[in-house]
Amino acid sequence: MKKKTAVVTGGTSNDVPAMACLVMNIKDTNPGLADEIVIYHDGISEKDQRLINRIFPTRFILYESPFKDVMNFGDVVTKYFSPMVFCKYECFKLLDDYECVIWTDYDVLICKDLSELKKIGKSAIQMITTNSITVRDAFAKEYSIEKILPGYDFSQPGVCMSLFSISEKLKNYDVLYDWCIKRTKELAKYIFYPEQAIVNILFQEYNIQIDRLIPKIYSVHPVQDVITEDIKVLHTYGQPKFWSGLYNEIWETNYKKWIKSGGTPYKHRTKTYQVQQAIKKIIKYLLPYGFVRLIQKMRRLI
């Protein structure tokens, strides 16, 4: 028998602290949003899995990438996003187990109730779309994608997949999953915003209508965008993140709770790492060339 709702996220084991903070955030702001959380990962330790499960019932799924044999992804896919970004496609398959699946990236801070994401509107999909990024923008600029993929409207507003929900009412979701895998392999070298490029043309291919989530409410950058009372989700798209230089009191409180519970920390935030970096800087200046530079600086000051 299907469970009602799952909130899903996923990423590399390096970001388990951020995923733990997201789970705490969901528990604090939306404790009734889901029956359980689902995390796709590439090797989160059993200890960290147990600790997260103490916060909120969580199902961990080791992501078996269907793209291991694909060698022509661009650098932006492999170095900036990581292939784990494609685990968002798995939300289609999860409809075998849940009536509603809600995906959220983990570089977010949820501020208010999100229960509306479980409601079925005119469509079985709710997703952010934005006029600032078109379907064309999701593909690499160096290719004439309009000629490679004739028949699609690349001027349409593109989707933003940081937050979305899909319902079991979506027809043929298994077919949609298979199509995404197939087209990702075929178009690997052309895509820029990896999964978004494919889902953009998926919706056109199958004439799928979606209920729009407004970015000014559901994907608001805490520094770059205007902050209003209507905001429901803060999203640190781009760099820095909450854990790498963009301070947020709630996120920092959750991170400290995670560390206190015995959870794996971010390496760059540990005292050991910071001491090592300080020593490296000292050694650099003590090396002959570095020492000469230090003497030169001192002479300029005298």
Image (spheres, rainbow, N blue to C red):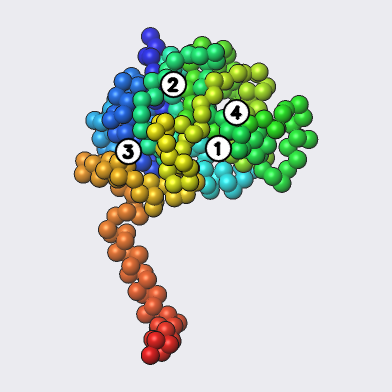
Give the CA distance from mark 3 to mark 1: 29 Å
Q: Amino acid at mark 3?
A: Cys
Report the disc number at residue 21: 3
Instruction: Classify mark 1: residues with Cα within 10 Å, few (<14), some (14-19) or many (20+).
Output: few
The residue shown at (59%, 48%) is 75
Give the CA distance from mark 2 to mark 3: 21 Å
Whichever of callouts 1 and 4 sits on the residue coming sooner in the sequence is 1
Whichever of callouts 4 and 3 sits on the residue coming sooner in the sequence is 3
The residue shown at (35%, 65%) is 277
- Quadrant in the picture for residue 198: top right
Give the CA distance from mark 1 to mark 4: 20 Å
Report the disc number at residue 294: none
Label 3's element? helix
Which residue is nearer to you in this view: 265 or 161?
A: 161
Q: Residue furthest top?
A: 1
Instruction: Classify mark 2: residues with Cα within 10 Å, few (<14), some (14-19) or many (20+).
Output: many
The residue identified by callout 4 is 199
Label 1's element? loop
The residue identified by callout 1 is 68
